[in-house]
Image: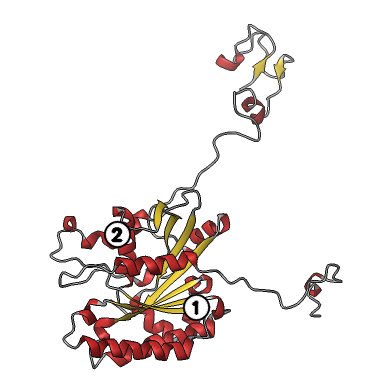
Amino acid sequence: MPRCSHPNCRIADTGLCLEGHKQGCPNLLPDEPAVASLSNEPGLTPDNTGPEPRRFHTGEKLTVREGSRLLNERPARVVLCAGSQESGKTTFLARIGEMFRNGTFSRYRFAGSLTLWGFERASWMATVASGTGRPITKRTRRIENDTFLHLRVHPEADPAHHVDLLISDLAGETFPTAIASREFCADLQALNRADHLVMFIDCDRLTNQVLRHQECDNARAFLQRVISVKHNPKNLHLQVVFSRWDYVFCHSDKSAQEKFLEAIEADFTKRFGVSFATLNFKRIAARPDGGIRPTDAEIQTIFAHWLESSLHQPIPTAARSQQPARDFSAFGLV
């Protein structure tokens, strides 16, 4: 609105000039820039026009972009869980969330999460409130590949030291595709960035004389595929988890089944022992049948390994020239 220098003129309110000028009134003042009006308000300046914007999350799993944003803000360990359908990957992650929720995690304490709804969704079908007759876990869907659960924890004895984790669960229905297709496996962002790989082998299938060899062959083929597409697999920590251990523990010939697992461990150690940063084997039952208690101690050991193992940083193979003739010649390659 026009403003007049005459104190009694109401042109700003009525649009009528006090002296009757239709246009070109010499008493009108020029308009001020919008920022100038803000500078008169307390706490508002041209460079500070309001509170700093803040990003909120839905609580669902993080996308690749959201995970990358977190990694840009602070360091985090990235974990990929892989295995065949119904091998217990999601149940294992749900159990980790449950232990932090009920306070039974002994070595680390919960310090926050951007994906609480993702953890709740994984555990919901195992609660009485869900109305199911027995505890089950919802499968990870294909569209959930390259999405991440987030956890922030601190050691029990050091509340000031926070560590972040991004955990991805490869959908079991795409596990055969990852084995068969090099391109598919190479495009998995979770694998490209992973510091830890958890390979699940289902004990239910291992106790089945018909299915056991296929289960082992698929695990071996997947690990060979990982070695072929991972930039430097020797920087990747590998944990082979014999999941649903209750099927072996309750088997009528338990000793024979345990010997078969020991043979698998020896074979995997021979094949992959020097291909990864570390290789170890665990036996877990995250939600066992038959009144057996979950193997919470083993699950906590797996989790602690993610946080306590040293990450291998690549070491340059050539000394950098401090005064290169061209930028791409800094390492003296050309």
Q: Residue 179 at x, y = what percent?
A: 42, 85
Q: Residue 85 at x, y = what percent?
A: 30, 78
Q: Which disc, if any, is residue 121? A: 2
Question: What residue is at 56 percent from the left and 54 percent from the top?
Answer: 73
Q: Are marks 2 and 1 in contact (CB under 8 Å)?
A: no
Q: Earlier in the sequence, mark 2 or mark 1?
A: 2
In this rendering, the answer to whether 242 lies above or below 287 is below
> Which of the pair 262/187 is nearer the observer?
262
> Which of the pair 12/284 is nearer the observer?
284
User: Which residue type carries mark 1?
Assistant: Thr
Q: Look at the numbered disc 2 and give the secondary structure of its residue.
A: helix
Count of residue discs: 2
Q: Residue furthest top?
A: 8
Q: Residue 192 at x, y = what percent?
A: 52, 74
Q: Which disc, if any, is residue 278? A: 1
Q: Look at the numbered disc 1 and give the secondary structure of its residue.
A: strand
User: Which residue type carries mark 2?
Assistant: Arg
Q: Quadrant of residue 218?
A: bottom left
